[in-house]
Amino acid sequence: MTQLPMQDPSYLDQSDAVRERLDRLKARDVILRVDRLTKRFQAGKNEITALDEISFETHRREFLCIIGPSGCGKSTLIRILAGLETLSDGQVLLDNRPVNGPGRERGMVFQGYTLFPWLTVRKNVMFGLRMNNVSRFDAQKQANEWLNLIGLEQFADCYPHQLSGGMKQRVAIARALVNHPRILLMDEPFSALDAQTRAKMQAYLLEIWKKIDITVIFITHDLDEAIFLADRILVLSAHPGRLQELIEVPMERPRKPEHFLSPEFAATKARLEALIHPPTEDTEEESYPSVPLLTDVRDSVE
Ligand SMILES: Nc1ncnc2c1ncn2[C@@H]1O[C@H](COP(=O)(O)OP(=O)(O)O)[C@@H](O)[C@H]1O
Ligand SMILES: [Mg+2]
């Protein structure tokens, strides 16, 4: 019997289960279509192209992560999708309709804690509903259902400052989802949390996503987070922000912490590393100057 040499899997290898799942996903309706989106900023006399002809599609109930180096235009992109920023060229279509401003079919969760500090947890969750003229009684009922779902019903009458960071982001998610958006836009929502809380929030977000009809666009600069969460990962390059690759994550669902140790995970991470931190001529020594000897003590401390 001949033994085949052991070979690491490529990030392009997909098990039958993964391929079938992704095929089903790509057969679903397109919720969001971004077509040659370009964004230029005026900086004094200069013009900066922050995003250059970005095109992609997101399907119903897809979990799409966007990663890229700092300054590559991730926040600009999600702000344009949210309608908080105008685009310079191209178009964004949500359910085939152009996005021209904010709308209640898009929920947003940002990195900073964006709850209203002067409102209780329940009133924070009720806020969007009340703005949309839902009666106080119905808004309260729906807010209570969501607080129940996120396990914070006993904190309904607390104020945000009385909650931990993870709890605040759970409320922020509930506040966005209570309005039944078609799409949830998240810009590094867990990056201010400690590692343990962050891991719990990732698992928790996937639990919610599984239970409701929501498409998620999630920005992160954490490669592990992107692989753990996403169906597909959009990789951007910097200066100008361009689409480098759309990676299909070759990992089965439900995702579990032990997946972090799988060969598929390692292969995907290696690909993302290569795209985001390509090897350059620059050596570490160049970016970190050697530390001069500051004392007369010549005894080695090694
Ligand atoms: N309002 C603005 N005016 C001018 N330049 C901006 C503005 N907002 C962002 N930029 C520039 O656009 C680029 C992308 O920024 P941003 O979207 O915040 O990147 P990321 O979120 O990926 O770190 C950066 O070079 C940034 O300086
Ligand atoms: Mg950003």
Image (cartoon, rainbow, N blue to C red):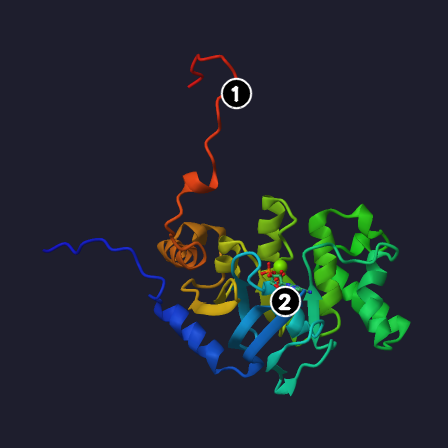
Q: Residues within 10 Å of mark 2 (few under 14, many from 20)?
A: some
Residue to which mark 1 is pinned: 294
Residue to which mark 2 is pinned: 76
Separation of residues labelled 2 and 1 (CA atoms): 45 Å
Mark number, residue 237: none
Disc 2 Cβ-to-ligand 1 distance below 8 Å:
yes
Residue 216 shows in the view = yes
Residue 231 shows in the view = no
Label 2 or label 1, whichever comes before in sequence order? 2
Q: Quadrant of ligand 1?
A: bottom right
Q: For the residues carrying marks 2 and 1, which lies nearer the camera in this image?
A: 1
Picture coordinates of residue 85, whole percent (x, y)? 69, 72
The answer to which quarter of the image holds residue 97 is bottom right
- The answer to whether 244 appears left or right of 144 in the picture is left
What residue is shown at x 39% (from left), y 72% (from top)?
19
Picture coordinates of residue 169, whole percent (x, y)? 70, 56
The answer to which quarter of the image holds residue 180 is bottom right
- The answer to whether 5 appears left or right of 1 in the picture is right
- The answer to whether 152 appears left or right of 97 in the picture is right
Observer-nearest of 59 and 272: 272
**Image vertical order of residue 232 relative to residue 300, above or below:** below
